[in-house]
Image (cartoon, rainbow, N blue to C red):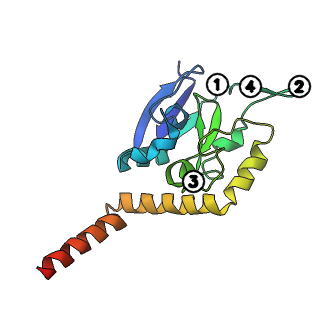
Amino acid sequence: EPRCAVTSSIGANIATASGQATGSPIDIGAMPDITKLFSLTDAQKMNILQSRFHPGKSWTAPQRTFGKKKRRIGDEFFDAEKYPTLRYSISLDGLYCVACVLFSQGDTPITLRERPLQDWSNATKVVSKHLKTQAHLGAQQRAAEFVRVFKEDQPTVLACMDKAHAEQVARNR
């Protein structure tokens, strides 16, 4: 019996994972080299942006030891309305900011972008601070613009510039 499911708003059930899951195609932490996601197609980026892990009622997050206390990810981090850009990696038991992973210009801290946040004792503070940074807000804005262009099937700015350049060259001949 499945204990959790990974779903997407652009598709039905994408993958089902047990408590021992080691990743799925949309587990951002299971990607071969998270620092090279620029090579993804627009459709792959869209799938990552709109896919998220939803723990089932019987799913229990792994525990980590911090000092003398054992902690696990809090349920609040799975709230898509409160944290729309956070993605939980079931393979790494950690959080990523999908906007920063895909659209950061390298100006955001490594944690949540290249490395998952796994320190559950300070997670709320780290995430709250991250969400207020200019770097995150810029990445979030680029992600929102990407989604808008993708859904409306509009050409990218570069494609428009290339077309305008080609038209200018044709007129000059």
- Extreme right residue here? 68
Q: Which residue is mark 1?
A: 58
- Please identify, in this view, whether the residue under mark 4 or under mark 3 is nearer the observer: 3
| Residue 104, placed above or below residue 33 | below
Image coordinates for residue 65, horizontal then vertical, percent = 80, 25
Q: Badge 4: how crowded within 10 Å, few (<14), some, or many (20+)?
A: few
- Position of the C terminus, as image quadrant, is bottom left
Q: Which amino acid lies under the numbered mark 1 shown in the image of this protein? A: Ser
Image coordinates for residue 156, horizontal then vertical, percent = 34, 64
Q: Which residue is mark 3?
A: 106
Whether pointer 1 and pointer 3 mark residues with C-beta atoms closer than 8 Å, the reply is no
**Distance (Cα) linking label 1 and label 4:** 15 Å
Tell which circle, 4 or 3, labels the residue nearer the N-terminal end. Answer: 4
Residue 34 horizontal side relative to residue 74, left or right: left
- Extreme bottom residue here? 172
Tell which circle, 3 or 2, labels the residue nearer the N-terminal end. Answer: 2
Q: Helix, strand or loop at disc 3?
A: loop
Tell which circle, 1 or 4, labels the residue nearer the N-terminal end. Answer: 1
Tell which circle, 1 or 3, labels the residue nearer the N-terminal end. Answer: 1
| Residue 132, placed above or below residue 20 | below
Q: Which amino acid lies under the numbered mark 2 shown in the image of this protein? A: Lys
Q: Which amino acid lies under the numbered mark 4 shown in the image of this protein? A: Gln
Quarter of the image where one finds residue 92: top right
Q: Which amino acid lies under the numbered mark 3 shown in the image of this protein? A: Gly
- Please identify, in this view, whether the residue under mark 1 or under mark 4 is nearer the observer: 4
Q: Badge 1: how crowded within 10 Å, few (<14), some, or many (20+)?
A: few
